[in-house]
Image (tube, rainbow, N blue to C red):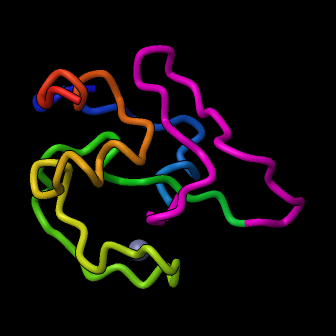
């Protein structure tokens, strides 16, 4: 929810949603809901853009989402340019840290 407060996801299976550079869901941290970003087919994996809620991750990772616009390495919004961040829906606490 911000740099100091984190959400405990409920149901806890939500903690296993993987990152994608082409996400199909967004975590709305203001309303505590998950919002679909496009039509999702039955059986399709739910994926969200980790930097949409994470400013600076304790541990980054090499992304293997396979999207043609994959950002390759994910470590949080702090490490991405504004032109990249503008492509994504971002949580308000991330939006407040940048001026898009
Ligand atoms: Zn990727």
Q: Residue at x 28, y 26 (%)?
A: 1
Vertical placement of 60 versus 54: above or below?
below
Looking at the image, the residue that sits furthest to the top is: 31
Q: Position of residue 2 (x, y in %)?
A: 19, 27
Magenta: main secondary structure: loop
Name the foreground residue: 71 vs 52.
Answer: 71
- Residue 6: say if magenta: no
- The answer to which quarter of the image holds residue 96 is top left
Q: Which residues are magenta?
A: 17-44
Image quadrant assignment for residue 54: top left
Find the residue positioned furthest to the front. 83
Q: Which of these two is toward me, 29 or 100?
A: 100
Residue at 17% x, 63% y is: 75
93 relative to 7 in the view: left or right: left
Residue 36 lies within the magenta run: yes
**Relative to residue 8, is residue 40 drawn left or right?**
right
Q: How many marks?
A: 0
98 to the left or right of 45: left
Location of ligand 1 given as a quarter of the image: bottom left
User: Which residue shows up at 69% across the image and 65% down it?
Assistant: 45
**Where the C terminus falls, by quadrant?**
top left
Q: Residue at x 23, y 76 (%)?
A: 73
* 50 or 4: nearer the viewer: 50
Instruction: Please say if 34 is above or below 56.
Output: above
Residue 42, percent across and down? 89, 60
- Residue 8: x and y, percent? 39, 35
């Amino acid at each position: 929810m911000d740099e100091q407060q984190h959400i405990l996801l409920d149901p806890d299976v939500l903690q296993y949603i993987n990152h994608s550079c082409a996400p199909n869901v967004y975590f709305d941290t203001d309303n505590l809901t998950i919002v679909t970003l496009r039509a999702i087919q039955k059986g399709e994996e739910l994926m969200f853009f980790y930097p949409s809620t994470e400013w600076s991750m304790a541990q980054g990772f090499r992304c293997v989402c396979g999207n043609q616009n994959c950002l390759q390495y994910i470590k949080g919004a702090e490490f991405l340019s504004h032109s990249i961040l503008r492509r994504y829906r971002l949580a308000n606490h991330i939006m407040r840290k940048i001026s898009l």
